[in-house]
Image: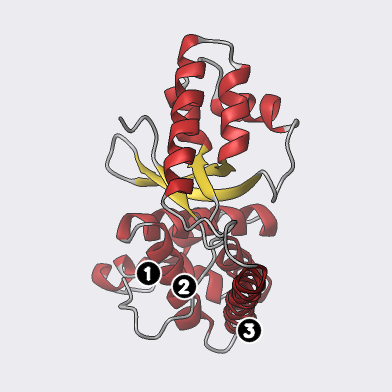
Amino acid sequence: MNLLKITTNEANEQLVSARDLHKSLEIKTRFSQWAEQNFKHFRKDEDFTSVVITTVVNNGATRLLDDYALVLDMAKHIAMMTGTDKGFEIRDYFIEVEKKFKNNHLDTSNLSPELQMFNGLFQSLAKQELATKQLETKVDNISEIVALNTTDWRKDSQKLIRRMAQNQGGFGAYQEINNLIYEETERRAGANLKQRLTNKRRRMADEGVSKSKRDKLNKLDVISEDKRILEVYIAVVKDFAIKYGVEIDTEKQEV
């Protein structure tokens, strides 16, 4: 019986989605309110971490949602705190999953002190190597993101957005992220990009430019005309790239 999907991270911790838990517990309170009420009893980045997931809405578009990855102990506590039969059922399920997980891993408690020492040393070195590789990847990623500037901004920003989309589910995510970046740019710059694009097309029509050329224009063409908005747009793309964990991998196919 699989009541909820449980994953394992690089630290060998079992994790469960907060949204999945909220749904399985049949909670009537809105997810955001439920999380605010319950998560204050736990430690961020230790008992739970923030993640972003994608979901497909009614019109087929992909939407980004905030979620949390909960360690199993936290998920058990929250399930028990509901005080419902469903809550205890899910808590018992977590306990059973935890038992099976532990049984599938080697018990080193009966090893000689020497072997236990070598096993602990090996585990410590393995964790250090993983942490070093993760840090190197993160530094490389941020270096490339920070390199985005006003010279090749159009090509580089679109490349970063495609990589964000790869992390979030593909083409639908690309459109969603692109729209969110435009919205945040408008908010920070205090500019209406849609209206500016309409005005630009009207001016070009008055100048006799063909409709086919006018239709090819997009908000990036508007952004390119205003240095201040361009700088805001580049800053927003950088912020989103870091937020959505862009991975620099030249072997991956771009969307």
Residue 92 coordinates in the image, percent (x, y):
48, 24
Q: Nearer the viewer, residue 41 or 148?
A: 41
- The residue that appears at 44% across and 25% down in the rendered structure is 23
Between discs 3 and 1, the one toward the N terminus: 3
Residue under circle 2? 221
Q: Nearer the viewer, mark 3 or mark 1?
A: 3
Residue 202 horizontal side relative to residue 52, left or right = left
Tell me if mark 3 has few (under 14), some (14-19) or many (20+) residues whose alpha carbon lies within 10 angstroms of its own: few
SS class, disc 1: loop
The mark closer to the camera, 2 or 3, is 3
Q: Are marks 2 and 3 in contact (CB under 8 Å)?
A: no
What residue would you read off at disc 3? Answer: 143
Is residue 69 at least partly visible in the picture?
yes
Is label 3 in a helix, a strand or a loop? helix
Q: Quadrant of residue 57?
A: top left
- Asked if the residue at tag 2 contacts the one at tag 1, i.e. Cβ–Cβ closer than 8 Å, the answer is yes
For marks 2 and 3, give the CA distance. Answer: 27 Å
Question: Where does residue 166 sit, x and y in percent of width and height?
Answer: 38, 65
The answer to whether marks 3 and 1 mark residues whose Cβ atoms lie closer than 8 Å is no
**Residue placed furthest toward the top:** 84
Q: Amino acid at mark 3?
A: Ser
User: Going from the N terminus, do you reach mark 2 or mark 3 first?
Assistant: 3
- Report how far apart the C-alphas of labels 3 and 1 lie in the structure: 31 Å
Colour scheme shown = secondary structure
- Name the quadrant of the N terminus: top left
> Split into 4 quadrants, where in the image is the C terminus?
bottom left
Mark number for residue 217?
1
Q: Nearer the viewer, residue 140 or 69?
A: 69
The quarter of the displayed image where residue 60 is located: top left
Q: Secondary structure at mark 2?
A: helix
Q: Where 146 sits versus 163, above or below?
A: below
